[in-house]
Image: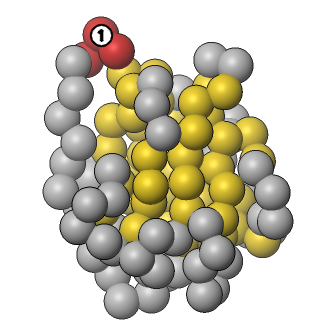
């Protein structure tokens, strides 16, 4: 599923590098749930992704990511996160076996 938003409001993108044929996902200035639940703002239909795996929240002109109590955790650049983590362009986000790349 692709998130289709007004291009003028796009503040970032998530590119899928591994695990799915979905995306890219355009991000506007709002909070997103990332998971395999159909109601997720960023839907990752992969069995290793929790229903509500992570949360992306706009902060200070960018985005932060936080794990939402998933089974396998959320990694940024290979390190498991345990609190909100600011994303920089080029950061790799691993959600289960799905790897995303953040672009601003």
Residue 52 position (above or below residue 11): below
| Residue shown at the point (67%, 56%) measured from the top left | 66
| Residue shown at the point (33%, 81%) measured from the top left | 46
Q: Give coordinates of residue 58: x percent, y percent.
A: 58, 30
- Give the SS element for disc 1: helix
From the viewer's perspective, tell me whether residue 70 is left or right of residue 16: right
- Residue lying farthest to the top in this orientation: 8
Residue 4 position (above or below residue 62): below
Q: Give coordinates of residue 78: x percent, y percent.
A: 74, 68
- Front-most of residues 88 and 73: 73
Q: Give coordinates of residue 56: x percent, y percent.
A: 55, 46
| Residue shown at the point (78%, 64%) measured from the top left | 81
Q: Residues within 10 Å of mark 1 (few under 14, many from 20)?
A: few
From the viewer's perspective, tell me whether residue 58 is left or right of residue 2: right
From the viewer's perspective, tell me whether residue 35 is left or right of residue 23: right
| Residue shown at the point (64%, 75%) measured from the top left | 69
Residue identified by numbered label 1: 8
């Amino acid at each position: 599923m692709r998130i289709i938003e007004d291009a003028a409001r796009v503040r970032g993108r998530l590119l899928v590098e591994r695990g799915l044929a979905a995306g890219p996902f355009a991000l506007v200035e709002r909070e997103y749930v990332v998971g395999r639940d159909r109601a997720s703002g960023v839907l990752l239909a992969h069995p290793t992704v929790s229903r509500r795996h992570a949360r992306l929240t706009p902060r200070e002109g960018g985005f932060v990511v936080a794990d939402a109590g998933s089974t396998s955790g959320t990694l940024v650049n290979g390190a498991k996160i345990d609190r909100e983590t600011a994303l920089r362009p080029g950061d790799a986000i691993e959600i289960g076996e799905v790897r995303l790349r953040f672009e601003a």
